[in-house]
């Protein structure tokens, strides 16, 4: 029995009253239910499809049932009433297109009664709600278990692409097929079909140029789902000034990730991920982006704010969804930005605190047990807000502390940002002077100084950037350390207390 069917059967056997299959592939979900009950002829399976029709999923007796039992045009209330008092064999009742009905008090009350009867064992049944929209009314919450269909694996994606190419009489090399499979990971069967059909319709044959089309379509699909964002990769390790220890560490992991099978065979552990904590604006996000580029994999940003849902259970489901998607897209980098925000209030007894605790639990279990090549890069400013378990060895492969850049690093950061904007002026800039004047500046402060200097000379009509121009902007700038001295000191102390590894190689401040 395949994954989804097995999961459905297990839930049914464990008497879960309502299974909510959240999917855009309604037909596929119905087939999974049908396969789950295939061997048990005692189970009757009825489907209500949002109209006045009820049909038997296995035997396809459309309308006959409703006409015989309930007369013409029965309402959903009639059907539910009949089901609640129905005491025949074990049965499965599938509700489709229920989005507009589920909030109606008459329907909610009947579903609640039905689910309660199942729960206490008076009725042997399972209710399935199959919908692309996740709507859980609070009254039904305790009876509902949300499940998602698994993403197709590489073999399945391969067969879908091959099938479509055969239909369109398009031939494809083995190498191109592998690239397509890689690019289509993390999408549903329906989405894969749509994208491949689109690619086929745009050209006579398929070639490498279609891979970028696939990635663009995929980025939009992931974006629409609203939990993960596929971040375009522009920055590389060369764009990071300093942080040499962290960069060396990433280069080492790249050696493992690029030869994963060989490394595992050799006895190397699958890299889990990294936590980067420290001062704002000093290159944490930059490092997440550069890591994905170095590993040559997609970067998925998990927005903790968007993860927190309105309904009870929704946040955890969103977390599971994000994890499942990241696993399906693996190898990838899953970037969890501002990790501490999700865990704020975890100690508090508020309901927000409870949600955070559960989220935290499922995230920790996953980081601990994951076997996929979804490499986590978590970033956080305030480590005091992170639960102590998060800092334990084993959760992440390493925890790095990123502080304010030292002299050598500031020089590199100036160089990077001047080069980006005014490459030809760089040889004339006296970097050592700028470095002395910018003690306590973050990387973002330095970038801001360079940006403003370039804008100023443009407005003033000058044709080249000089050290003096940058001096003048520095004079009018307040460094991060000036503005947040106490906070930065606190972050530094905490990181030292935890004996976190420094991202920077020792050098003069
Ligand atoms: P926050 O916690 O506020 O998100 P962060 O540590 O993630 O901060 P980044 O977003 O990486 O900071 O940095 C902001 C910008 O500052 C970067 O886009 C980059 O242009 C510049 N910057 C910061 N640190 C460096 C660095 N070490 N080298 C080059 N540029 C840097």
Image (cartoon, rainbow, N blue to C red):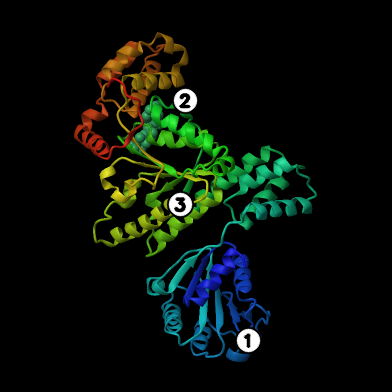
Mark 2 and mark 3 in contact (Cβ < 8 Å)?
Answer: no
Element at label 3? loop
Element at label 2? helix
Quadrant of image for the C terminus: top left
Q: Is residue 173 left or right of residue 101?
A: right
> Residue 107 is drawn in which quadrant?
bottom left
Return the residue at label 1.
Answer: 65
Task: Single out the mark in the foreground, 1 or 3.
Answer: 3
Q: Is residue 452 left or right of residue 187?
A: left
Q: Which residue, as the protein is rendered here, is positioned at the far left? A: 486
For the residue pair 76 and 284, the one nearer the viewer reads as 284
Q: Is residue 225 left or right of residue 137?
A: right
Q: Position of residue 16 (x, y in %)?
A: 47, 75
Element at label 1? helix
Return the mark for residue 227: 3
Of callouts 3 and 2, the N-terminal one: 3
> How packed is label 1: few (under 14 Cα within 10 Å), some, or many (20 or more)?
some
Ligand 1 lies in quarter: top left
> How packed is label 2: few (under 14 Cα within 10 Å), some, or many (20 or more)?
few
Return the residue at label 2.
Answer: 238
Q: CA distance from mark 1 to mark 3?
A: 42 Å
Quadrant of image for the N terminus: bottom right
59 in relation to 401, above or below: below
Q: Position of residue 342 (x, y in %)?
A: 34, 51
């Amino acid at each position: 029995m395949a994954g989804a069917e097995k999961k459905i059967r297990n839930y049914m056997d464990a008497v879960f009253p309502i299974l909510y299959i959240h999917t855009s592939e309604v037909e596929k979900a119905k087939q999974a239910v049908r396969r789950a009950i295939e061997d048990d002829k005692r189970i009757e399976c009825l489907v209500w499809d949002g109209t006045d029709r009820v049909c038997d999923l296995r035997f396809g007796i459309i309308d006959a049932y409703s006409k015989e039992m309930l007369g013409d045009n029965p309402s959903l209330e009639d059907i539910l009433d009949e089901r609640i008092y129905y005491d025949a064999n074990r049965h499965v009742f599938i509700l489709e297109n229920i989005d507009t009905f589920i909030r109606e008090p008459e329907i909610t009350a009947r579903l609640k009664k039905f689910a309660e009867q199942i729960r206490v064992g008076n009725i042997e049944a399972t209710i399935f709600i199959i919908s692309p929209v996740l709507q859980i009314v609070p009254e039904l919450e305790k009876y509902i278990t949300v499940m998602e269909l698994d993403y197709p694996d590489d073999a399945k994606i391969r067969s879908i692409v091959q099938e479509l190419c055969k239909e369109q009489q398009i031939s494809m090399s083995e190498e191109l097929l592998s690239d397509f499979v890689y690019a289509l990971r993390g999408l549903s069967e329906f989405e894969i079909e749509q994208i491949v059909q689109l690619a086929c319709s745009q050209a006579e044959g398929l070639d490498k140029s279609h891979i970028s089309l696939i990635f663009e379509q995929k980025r939009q699909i992931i974006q629409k789902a609203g939990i993960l964002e596929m971040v375009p990769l522009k920055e590389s390790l060369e764009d990071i000034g300093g942080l040499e220890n962290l960069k060396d560490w990433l280069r080492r992991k790249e050696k493992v990730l690029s030869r994963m099978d060989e490394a595992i065979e050799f006895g190397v552990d699958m890299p889990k991920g990294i936590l980067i904590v420290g001062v704002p604006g000093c290159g944490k996000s930059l490092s997440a982006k550069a890591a994905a580029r170095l590993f040559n994999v997609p970067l998925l940003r998990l927005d903790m704010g968007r993860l927190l849902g309105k309904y009870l259970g929704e946040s955890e489901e969103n977390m599971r969804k994000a994890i499942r998607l990241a696993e399906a897209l693996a190898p990838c980098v899953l970037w969890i930005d501002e990790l501490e925000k999700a865990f704020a209030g975890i100690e508090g007894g508020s309901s927000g605190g409870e949600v955070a605790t559960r989220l935290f639990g499922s995230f920790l279990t996953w980081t601990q047990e994951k076997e996929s090549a979804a490499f986590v890069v978590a970033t956080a400013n305030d480590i005091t807000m992170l639960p102590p378990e998060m800092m334990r060895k084993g959760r992440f492969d390493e925890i790095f502390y990123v502080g304010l850049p030292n002299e050598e690093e500031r020089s590199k950061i100036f160089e990077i940002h001047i080069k980006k904007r005014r490459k030809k002026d760089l040889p004339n800039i006296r970097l050592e002077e700028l470095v002395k004047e910018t003690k306590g500046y973050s990387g973002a402060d330095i970038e801001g100084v360079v940006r403003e200097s370039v804008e100023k000379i443009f407005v003033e009509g000058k044709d080249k950037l000089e050290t003096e121009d940058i001096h003048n902007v520095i004079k009018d700038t307040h460094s991060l350390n000036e503005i947040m001295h106490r906070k930065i000191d606190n972050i530094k102390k905490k990181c030292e207390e935890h004996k976190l590894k420094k991202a920077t190689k020792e050098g003069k401040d």
